[in-house]
Amino acid sequence: MLTTIEKILFVLAVLASAYGGYLGALKIIKIVSQGHGKPEWGLVGKRLIKTVFKVGSLQPTWSLRFGTSILHAFVAWGFLYYILVNIGDFLQAFIKDYTFLGNGVLGNIYRLGSDILSVAVLIGMIYLMIRRFLFKPEILHIRDDILLYPKAKKGISRDSAIVGGFILLHVGFRFIGESFHIAAEGIDPWQPFASSLSSLWTSLHPVSVVVLQHVSFWIALGLILAFIPYFPHSKHLHLIVIPFNYLLQPERRSMGELAPLDFEDEENEQFGALNLEDLGWEQILDSYACIMCNRCQEVCPAYNTGKVLSPSALEVNKRYFLNYEGNSLAEGEQSKKSLLDFAIKEEAVWACTTCGACIGICPVGNEPMRDILDIRRGLVLMENKFPEQWQTAFRGMERTNNPWNIPSSERMKWAEGLNVPTVKENPDFEYLWWVGCAPSTDAQAQKTAIAFVKILNAAGINYAVLGEQETCSGDSARRAGNEYLFYEMATANVELLNGIGSKKIITTCPHCFHTIKNEYPAFGGNYQVIHHSQFIEQLLNNGRISLHHDAAGDLITYHDPCYLGRQNGIIKEPRLVIQQTGASLIEMPRHGTKSFCCGAGGAQIWKEEEEGTEAIEEARFDEAVKTGADTIAVACPFCMIMLTDAAKTKNSDMKIKDIAEIVAEML
């Protein structure tokens, strides 16, 4: 129980602390509101239960660094529980003879929880502090060649020390204070740890115990009041921002789905993002949600092969820029620095493969890949900047409707001698097969198309292809940042598909699959799109095709295409196909939603990789070789091309085959 003077001082401290926190929160709200778009508050009701589960279970953190995540969970769960503990301590301090939740079953359980979780927080926090400041694992650092806001390097360590010290002192002194209370009132069997500690104070004078109890209270609760004004500037703010990230993130069909730009609005003078305020409100909010854990960096294929791209540094730079230079932005003024000045190097912008690994692994729901794509849009559309090698691909898409620059008259050459009906020859088709540019033009990818023809014909599928009418889906244009070119291609393709009445579409390319399924709806194209790996699995299950011999004894490892597995959740079906061949499936360490990129996505296939220590496709190929498999199974023509190139570079005789080839050989 506090004295009257203590109560007055405490209330004044609360008011001062709350005002400081209010000013910080108001600044953040103003800054976030400068971004494009507005939150859809109607999403809250649909996502509330799922968000409560994710926040309460810390589910997104368990996919990486399991041991450390357990210790972090001790801290997180304990700190969440301490919201209740701090309320209880406040009420007990202000109300005479009051026991929070009473001395019955509920009160006993509450005190047991506070006792156990206090120790858990202290253990977890001590481990995390030792890990960061003594062990200093490489994964917690950002390489020196990465652009980092000048005040961020020291700021990250300082912020971690302040937050860690605050938690240790706050929880520690609350725990010690409870032991003083027990020393004065008698052993509490529902607080075994605090009771054990209280035995150290038996020799102290009762007055000293009371004084120390008050001192502990003021340190424990006073630290919170001192921390609140700092809270909006610290990475600890993620405790508040994370739920909003989960609740209000715009709805998307896939993590890689991009919203179209409005080229019809004559008043629109800005396309893409050159400055921070050009990003969406949710992208600005991401910087406040970031916990600087570097998980995104740890899985980024560009960073892991020595490129100067770190998705973590991008979010950290945004955060520190806003902390130190965000006042003018909060007042609606334009940023004095572009994103390339403080957030990310231009070279890093072009290095991204848009694989989505950074989004998939982020425990707080951040999406740094989307920032990079918006910056690409800004550079291409507003400044006409892009890698010179992309000019060839852009010119091909503009002139011949495909990045290979192959005339439409040659689009069906691969099918000569095969029974492949076009929509003109078979207007009553059930399935439209969108062949794609790679299988239509690239010799290696054509093997997939030929194998799939064999499967479709063996199953008696009523299908047709567009033939010379087929053009590029526009994926490479969009991922490269040339949104206007994509807009033209998507508009034309949707008009064509709607005109012929296509509703069921099969693709052999995950990039075409993703674009037609997830991004064409914004242009009026709504179709049932299925990837050929899914379709083959259905044919096998339904008995439409049968395998007359198996691959028993063959060792196959499967490489998950990023735009199939991580971005569209198609992971099981390709593996079921491989298993039905009788081959032994050996998984690479990084597979499924954690698969490592082949290096082709994000229009990288049309240019040389940015400078680094290793080629991405070679890193992935080495991983496949280490499994001891005879064959790498793929389900994407881009992956086929990249891994085949890697095999040639490595002088390896390891086979790379599309799953359609593997099945067709056994029909």
Image: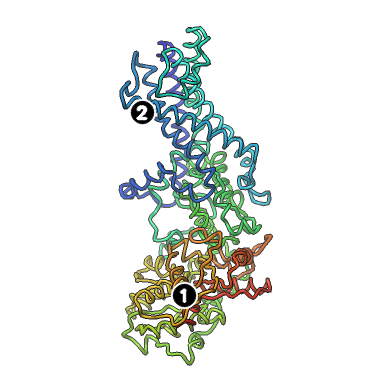
Please name the residue that numbered disc 1 is placed on: 581
Q: Nearer the viewer, residue 528 or 268?
A: 528
Coordinates of residue 417 in the picture (x, y in percent) = 48, 92
**Can residue 435 be spotted in the picture?**
yes
Horizontal and vertical percent for residue 345?
62, 54
Residue type (three-letter) at the residue carrying disc 2: Ile
Instruction: Check contact, mark 2 vs mark 1: CB within 8 A.
Output: no
The quarter of the displayed image where residue 638 is located? bottom right
Residue denoted by label 2: 109
Residue 667: mark: none
Given the current orientation, which residue lies at the most extreme bottom position?
417
Residue visible at 53% across and 72% down in the picture: 633
Question: Of discs 2 and 1, which sits in the foreground?
Answer: 1
Q: Residue at x 32, y 27 (%)?
A: 106
Q: In the displayed image of the protein, which residue is found farthest to the front?
A: 553
Q: Amino acid at mark 1?
A: Thr
Screen quadrant of the N terminus: top left
Indicate whether 182 appears above or below 169.
above
Q: Secondary structure at mark 2?
A: helix
Which of the two discs, 2 and 1, labels the residue nearer the N terminus? 2
Asked whether residue 386 is in view, the answer is: no
Q: Is residue 98 above or below residue 408?
A: above
Residue 168 appears left or right of 97:
right
Q: Is residue 247 or residue 496 the one in the foreground? A: 247
618 horizontally vs 527: left or right:
right
